[in-house]
Amino acid sequence: MGKGKKYGVPLYGATWVPSSAAAAKLDSDNEFQTPSKPLVFLAGGGGDGHSGIPNALLLSAFDPESSSLSDQPVAKLGTGSDLPYRIGVHPGGDGIICAFPKNCKWFEWDSKTDDQTLSLKSSEKVLEPLEDVVQQLALTFNSEGTLLAAGDEDGKLRVFKWPAMETLLSEATGHSSVKDLDFSPDGKFLASVGGSGPGRIWDVASSSSRASLPKENGEIFGFCRFSRSTDTDQVLYITTLRDKGGSIVKWNPTSWTRISSTYVSRDPISAFNVSPDGKLLAIGTIQGDILIISSANMRVQTVSKKAHLGLVTALAFAPDSRALVSASLDSSSRVTLIKDVKKGGMHSSLICLTY
């Protein structure tokens, strides 16, 4: 098992750069070419500056041949004394939104035609509804990139039309604080979990509450994600914490009732995500472990013990569901490759290789 790459700043966000963003325009024939090495976006830092640790947005290249991230960032953009705490990548490749302590800012991908590299630049676009606000704890776009949801530490939840930033939904009392948000694949519903009370389902079109998802037996809700598959077997996943550890609860997205609850970790879950093909779930723990789970039977397929020395802060599957990038407060990021192995042409299992 390989080691993660250290980038000098505690990392709070990680995601794959959409291939459409990484297309570099060639002057010679006016065509677009996607760089051979996928790019990973990372965000983090030391906070207000008293620690001496900078705050920055980073791009790292993933080399498929060596199955490793670049030793150094291929691009870096400092953010001064402002810590980029949460991120939301636009699915169409237009750019990325970052939540800072008092506002949110929009950053654009900057393609350089001379060497087909990609960097970042601060946009002139001002997100007025998210200026002079408290810390946003959750940011997410819908799958089409036409809606942006944001939730803050005071419990205010809002949905905006993108890019106009016209408010479609505004709810100030849904939670004491908003922990996580996720749109359903069709964009009709928004799931939210927070610091107190039940989980909530919001009808985006009518700007109203559709359902309440109650907690049981002292559960604490952590993260929420809809299955990304487009078939009829849609589910909503919510991670929970109880005395015995971390579990994943499955909910029916029609009746909004519980389907099952599966215990997966004795340690609290600090990061969670679902693969684009809907077949895999990934969790990171406060102890730095990464677990890959089959959505079909909710069994843990692979455990990478101490993948990071600090708690896992972010997980993101690649668009093809074949790789998982993770980030940690220990300033490291790494990629876990996921491969199918067939035995006798009948059985397939998962092997995960972490670099």
Image: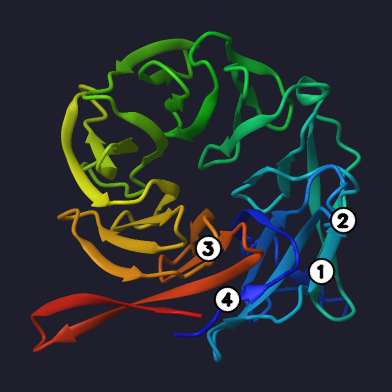
Q: Nearer the viewer, mark 1 or mark 4?
A: 4
Q: Mark 4 points at which residue?
A: 4
Alpha-carbon distance for marks 1 and 4? 18 Å
How far apart marks 4 and 3 lie (CA) works out to 9 Å
Q: Of residues 239 and 150, which is closer to you in this image?
A: 239
Q: Earlier in the sequence, mark 3 or mark 1?
A: 1
Residue with the mark numbered 3: 326
* Residue 62 percent location from the top left of the image: 61, 78
- For this rendering, which residue is in front, 245 or 312? 245
* Percent x, y of residue 83: 78, 44
Using the image, determine if residue 85 lies above or below residue 183.
Answer: below
**Label 4 secondary element:** loop
Looking at the image, tell me whether mark 1 or mark 4 is earlier in sequence order: 4
Picture residue at 36% right of the left edge, 40% below the top? 226
Residue at screen point 51% across, 31% down: 179
Quadrant for residue 3, please give it.
bottom right
309 relative position to 105: left or right: left
Check contact, mark 4 vs mark 3: CB within 8 A: yes
- Circle 3/circle 2 CB separation < 8 Å: no
| Relative vertical location of residue 282 with respect to residue 340 in this rendering, above or below | above
Residue 75 — which label?
Answer: 1
How many angstroms separate mark 2 from mark 1 (CA)?
Answer: 21 Å
Crowding around mark 3 (Cα neighbors within 10 Å: few <14, some 14 to 19, many 20+) is: many
Identity, as a three-letter code, of the amino acid under mark 2: Gly
The CA distance from mark 3 to mark 1 is 18 Å
Query: In the image, what residue type sits under mark 4?
Result: Gly
How far apart are the two marked residues, 4 and 2, measured between alpha carbons? 23 Å
The residue tagged 2 is 52
Give the amino acid type for the residue marked by disc 1 in the picture: Ala
Q: Which of marks 4 and 3 is nearer the N terminus?
A: 4
59 horizontally vs 161: left or right: right
Give amino acid for label 3: Ser
